Image (tube, grey):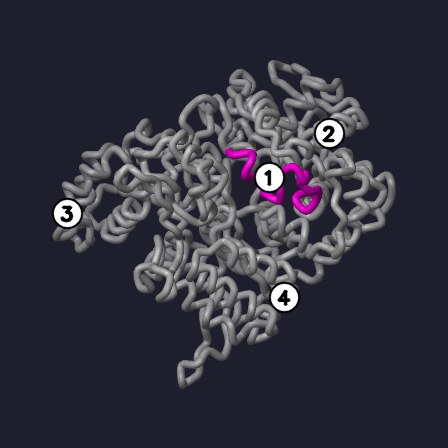
């Protein structure tokens, strides 16, 4: 029964671990279930790519800690508990950098404690050393990486006036390469695979190590073994595709993984965006948030199916995409003609890895390439079961502490969920899916002109689009509100959520004095811009506590429109100087006094800062001839069990 379901499984430091459920999987056809199963395996086969991308030593650090965990007999409880905590945070974050702050976290034990634990585990049978490198040599080599928070302290660092590549530990560039070298090399026309390659230095020259499997004629590249296994499972999925179009989509993806040619990726995306099958997927090098230049794609996989009952509202919203485009506050030259209704679905996730799991987004809009968005459209999905799991595992404590008054709390209780869902839907469908680039860019993607700033700018734009239309009467016609009064309440709730998010997120950044994650920068940018460029929001002090109260919703909307118009212009024109000024002024640096107050108040509530999901698992049902005749879904309810299972799978398919 729904009421008896367990969502919250455990608390690990700043993270909560939550079980994800995928209701409706059992109602899929057998063909759809088998198709989903092979896509699920394809995603798992590539999972370790994402971990390696986070840091060049991440995989061997994980292996080290997993082996100690598995062979822990005889290790002092206090020590193994802290080793386990570190390992679980590693699993949740896909490495040893915090997903929000990008800062390294380290074990809460000494190097000597860990060395002793490793020695015990090795005697128990753990495979920690090798013939080429014994345990002690290995530990000494990795000591700084694991235990020194000041050694390569950030995965991604885009502080102004520093070398972004030298100061970022993400594994997209050799450590002896500078930002200036890369920019000079790129301007000379040498970068052919910006999305799917690592830039290395050999004999003093920069080269691309392309992420590809090879095909006999085209040589193997980086991650070829992983990609060959991904391809194997994709090939198994093809006979179970919904139709010829979907089968072709997968064949195009296989070809891209073999060649690494981004023109082949474009062909796949054009086909994928037209695919309307019930079971769908995201697979490959997708989002570029981790790259300080905003070019390299992190590996991610997600398999999901349409939640038909919940999709109606999203479809209705998509039908009015041209209506909203025509009424955008930006100049007409940046408005596009929408020839085909965008695909917009509410989905239930079956399983996600890499950039999409265990930490998951709640909405997705792809493909990212501006050319495809303008010429062929995009797909937007709202992750229904992810949103539901968040809601089931999160209370109103934070709202009650930081809401400006009782009215705000009441609105959140009654309209918070629908305002969240509407915001996400508009963010993805008519936010990311809107606008067009200036002809001055010569057909190039705006991201090429806005290195390091594009992602924050685009997330800001999508959020502002949602806020601009929050009070539009068309929302009633679409079905999100039954009348004008309810629409007003939903719109006010969304505006209040935006202001609260702009400062309560400071509870998640520790002692950082600036933000690194693009969505966090976007939220702070909007918050600070409204505070500094209007009288719509009033800052109040009561009993030593700071509150922010919206006193003029119309003025706030006008300010949103002004900012949105400028953000669209910056994107369309590729205006890097304006992007830098806007984001560095409003989105980067935090008010440390407010940060400390927010953290002091929030810490008393002892709430988690983020959520990692234990994903559903798929198991084949075999007949006597070992042929798959069905697939069943299970819920492991155990993070460690699932992560160790994933790692074992990676080793067997390697």
Q: Is residue 561 left or right of residue 54?
A: right
Residue 623 rendering spot, x and y as whole percentages:
44, 83
Give how far apart the Cα atoms at labels 2 and 4 are.
36 Å
Q: Residue furthest front?
A: 188
Residue at image coords 70%, 44%: 434
Q: Please state which of the two labelled residues, at mark 1 or mark 4, is closer to the viewer.
A: 1
Q: Mark 4 falls on what kind of element?
A: loop
Q: Nearer the viewer, mark 2 or mark 1?
A: 1
In the rendered structure, the answer to whether residue 408 lies left or right of residue 56 reads right
Q: Residue at x 48, y 41 (%)?
A: 295
Q: Is residue 414 visible?
A: no
Residue 446: mark in rendering:
1
Q: Position of residue 425 (x, y in %)?
A: 69, 47
Which residue is found at the position 72% from the left and 25% from the top?
A: 405
Tell me the CA gap for discs 3 and 4: 50 Å
Residue 278 tag number: 4
Q: Identify the disc placed on residue 560.
A: 2
Label whose residue precedes the other's in the sequence (3 or 2): 3
- Residue at 42 percent across and 30 percent down: it is 164
Q: CA distance from mark 1 to mark 4?
A: 32 Å
Q: Are marks 1 and 3 in contact (CB under 8 Å)?
A: no
Q: Residues in magenta?
A: 431-451
Residue 133 image label: 3
């Amino acid at each position: 029964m729904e009421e008896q379901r367990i969502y919250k499984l455990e608390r690990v430091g700043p993270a909560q671990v939550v079980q994800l459920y995928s209701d409706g999987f059992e109602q899929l056809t057998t063909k759809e279930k088998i198709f989903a199963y092979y896509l699920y395996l394809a995603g798992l086969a590539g999972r370790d790519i994402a971990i390696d991308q986070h840091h060049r030593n991440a995989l061997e650090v994980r292996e080290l800690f997993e082996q100690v965990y598995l062979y822990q007999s005889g290790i002092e409880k206090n020590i193994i508990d802290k080793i386990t905590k570190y390992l679980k945070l590693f699993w949740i974050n896909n490495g040893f950098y915090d997903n929000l702050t990008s800062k390294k976290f380290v074990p809460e034990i000494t190097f000597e404690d860990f060395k002793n634990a490793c020695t015990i585990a090795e005697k128990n049978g753990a495979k920690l050393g090798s013939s080429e490198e014994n345990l002690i040599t290995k530990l000494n080599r990795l000591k700084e990486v694991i235990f020194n928070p000041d050694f390569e302290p950030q995965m991604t660092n885009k502080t102004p006036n520093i070398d972004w590549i030298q100061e970022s530990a993400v594994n997209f560039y050799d450590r002896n390469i500078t930002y200036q070298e890369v920019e000079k090399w790129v301007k000379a026309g040498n970068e052919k695979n910006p999305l799917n390659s690592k830039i290395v230095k050999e004999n003093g020259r920069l080269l691309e190590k392309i992420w590809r499997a090879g095909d006999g004629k085209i040589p193997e590249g980086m991650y070829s073994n992983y990609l060959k296994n991904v391809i194997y499972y994709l090939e198994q999925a093809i006979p179970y595709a919904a139709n010829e179009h979907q089968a072709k989509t997968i064949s195009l993806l296989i070809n891209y993984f073999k060649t690494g040619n981004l023109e082949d990726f474009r062909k796949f995306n054009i086909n994928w965006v037209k695919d309307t099958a019930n079971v769908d997927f995201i697979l490959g090098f997708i989002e570029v948030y981790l790259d300080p230049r905003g070019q390299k794609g992190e590996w991610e996989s997600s398999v999901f199916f349409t939640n038909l009952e919940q999709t109606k509202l999203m479809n209705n919203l998509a039908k009015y995409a041209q209506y909203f485009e025509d009424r955008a506050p930006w100049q007409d030259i940046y408005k596009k003609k929408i020839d085909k209704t965008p695909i917009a679905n509410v989905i239930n996730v079956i399983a996600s890895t890499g950039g999409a799991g265990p930490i998951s987004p709640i909405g997705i809009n792809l493909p990212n390439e501006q050319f495809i968005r303008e010429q062929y459209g995009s797909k937007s999905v709202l992750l229904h079961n992810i949103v539901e799991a968040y809601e089931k595992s999160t209370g109103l404590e934070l709202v009650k502490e930081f809401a400006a008054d009782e009215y705000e709390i009441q609105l959140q209780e009654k309209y918070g969920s629908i305002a969240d869902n509407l915001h996400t839907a508009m963010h993805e469908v008519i936010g990311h899916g809107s606008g067009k680039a200036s002809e001055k860019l010569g057909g190039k993607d705006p991201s090429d002109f806005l290195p390091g700033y594009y992602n924050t700018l685009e997330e800001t734009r999508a959020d502002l689009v949602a806020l601009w239309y929050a009070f539009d009467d068309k929302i009633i016609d679409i079905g999100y509100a039954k009348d004008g009064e309810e629409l007003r309440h939903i719109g006010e709730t969304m505006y209040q959520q935006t202001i609260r998010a702009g400062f309560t997120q400071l509870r998640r950044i520790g002692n950082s004095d600036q933000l690194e994650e693009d969505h966090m920068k976007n939220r702070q940018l909007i918050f600070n811009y409204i505070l500094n460029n209007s009288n719509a929001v009033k800052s109040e002090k009561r009993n030593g506590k700071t509150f922010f109260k919206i006193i003029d919703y119309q003025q706030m909307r006008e300010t949103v429109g002004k900012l949105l118009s400028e953000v669209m212009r910056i994107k369309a024109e590729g205006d890097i100087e304006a992007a830098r000024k806007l984001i560095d002024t409003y989105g980067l640096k935090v008010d440390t006094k407010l940060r400390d107050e927010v953290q002091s108040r929030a810490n008393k509530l002892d709430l988690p800062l983020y959520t990692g999901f234990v994903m559903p698992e798929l198991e084949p049902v075999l007949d006597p001839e070992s042929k798959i005749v069905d697939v069943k879904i299970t819920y492991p309810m155990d993070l460690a069990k699932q992560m160790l299972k994933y790692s074992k799978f990676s080793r067997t398919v390697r």
